[in-house]
Amino acid sequence: MSFDYDLFVIGGGSGGVRAARIAAGYGARVALAEEYRMGGTCVIRGCVPKKLMVFASSFPAAMTEARAYGWDAQIGAFDWTAFRAKLDAELDRLEKIYRAGQNGAGVTVFDQRATVAGPHEIRLADGTEVSAKHILVATGGRPFVPEFEGAEHVMTSNEIFKMEALPKRILIVGGGYIACEFACVFEGLGVDVTLWNRSPLLRSFDLECRDLIVDKMAARGIDIHTNCIVHRIEKTAAGLVVEAGDGRRETFDAVVYATGRVPNTEGLGLETAGVATARNGAVEVDAWSQTNVPSIYAVGDVTDRVNLTPVAIREGHAFADTVFGATPRQMEHDLIASAVFTRPEFGTCGMTEEEACKRGGVEIYVSTFRPMRSAFAGADDRVLMKLIVCTETRRVLGCHIVAPEAGEMIQLAAIAMKMGATKEQFDATCAVHPTMAEELVTMRNPTRHG
Ligand code: NDP
């Protein structure tokens, strides 16, 4: 049977573009369809613009520190319109790079929605039908907003980067990565920030680390309430009046919902081909990213495994190597480091203390201290470094860092962990002095056993 393409990728985000480019490099005839903008959530309305906002929000604190170091420095007002124009231009530039990457690799790009019409069939929004030997679903996810009265008045992370003006008072609902990161970003930009969540913030992370982060967020003036569920939002002349189940009633200029994300499979036609999906719509795949329909694969957030950009990229790459490169390999989902760009920043890899203690047979090493840079400036910042070590094998099972640039540090610690490094090998590594990260190789005695 002959097909129009060897591979048709649905979705031009991190996972899709990587798979398309690598498959084309192996000589496959590849097409990719993207209904919005090339680059996907990460580049267009996720990690990249978020990180640029993190940078933008860091300057007032840097200026305060500069004064403590003897500089006669003053910060003026933040010009959101000017920042947004630069941000838009930067995202345009990045999108062009993604598109050029596909073109350069010989991938045919369709700038329209595509749906699955059969095991080898794809239907484009303009009505065209094409066939492919393999289909890769890489449609990512989208923000989830629960149903309640007035839900139409809220924004999600999709709209934040398009705001016309910065609000004066913002309510952020949620307690995960997105809610906490944006709470810190908006606080840094001078917005009056309130954060409501139904449960403790950053619930899936190491308790001691998240306690420190949440304490510092509150100390900087973010008004945090947990066990708080929004019942109703009413738009009035004074702003958005938000009522919560605990009787709280407050008025804000904007409300952002960051209550998780759901896989983008609605209306994708997967049922036409018989592709199995989970209750939340995630495409069910095996370790090769293959669905129950042998010609259809899926990678990235649409599979709801580990929803992070670098994971989607690696899943897409492993798929292309396996199917088109004759070098079968699976993406390893263990020991994936990640960072939460709150202030203070958080870098984490492997088991939390709570998980480790359930397993048993572990030593917990903790070091907390005031970092040299901000201590000199008189700030009450604290750094926390934690290692979880298996008593029997001596391997480092978990590493958690709350510190400026923790994201950069955890990337390097994760290499050692992935290599199976033991606590003694960490200790045998000579410290870099004076740094914060040197604590990772100088913690002599366990703080606790679990
Ligand atoms: P998360 O799943 O991390 O957090 C969702 C939050 O919303 C939780 O606090 C959850 O509470 C709460 N919540 C869920 N459902 C409801 C509801 N019906 N009503 C009220 N509250 C609710 O989602 P995010 O949106 O923050 O992030 C989505 C994904 O994006 C993450 O899983 C992450 O993988 C990725 N991401 C990664 C980043 C990074 O690497 N730095 C940055 C941003 C996103 P509860 O705990 O009770 O369930």
Image: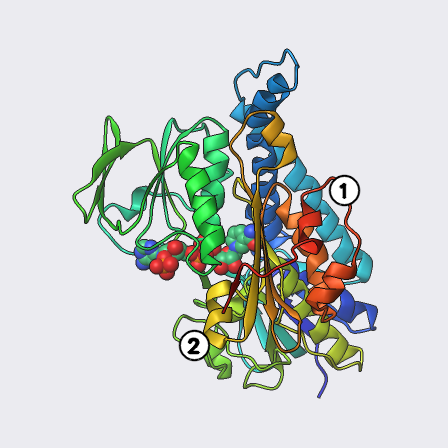
Label 1: element kind: loop
Amino acid at the residue labelled 1: His
Task: Measuring from the top left, give residue 238's x and y in whole percent.
Answer: 24, 26
Residue at the extreme bottom of the image, as rendered:
1
Figure quadrant of the N terminus: bottom right
Classify 10 Å Cα crowding around label 2: few (below 14), some (14-19), many (20 and above).
few
Viewer-nearest of discs 1 and 2: 1
Looking at the picture, which amino acid does disc 2 mark?
A: Ala
Question: Can you tell which quarter of the image residue 146 is in?
Answer: bottom left
The residue closer to the viewer here, 252 or 120, is 252
Q: Secondary structure at mark 2?
A: loop
Quarter assignment of residue 313 = bottom right
The residue where tag 2 is placed is 278
Is 327 above or below relative to 10?
Answer: below
Q: Quadrant of ligand 1?
A: bottom left
Picture residue at 30% right of the left edge, 46% below the top: 152
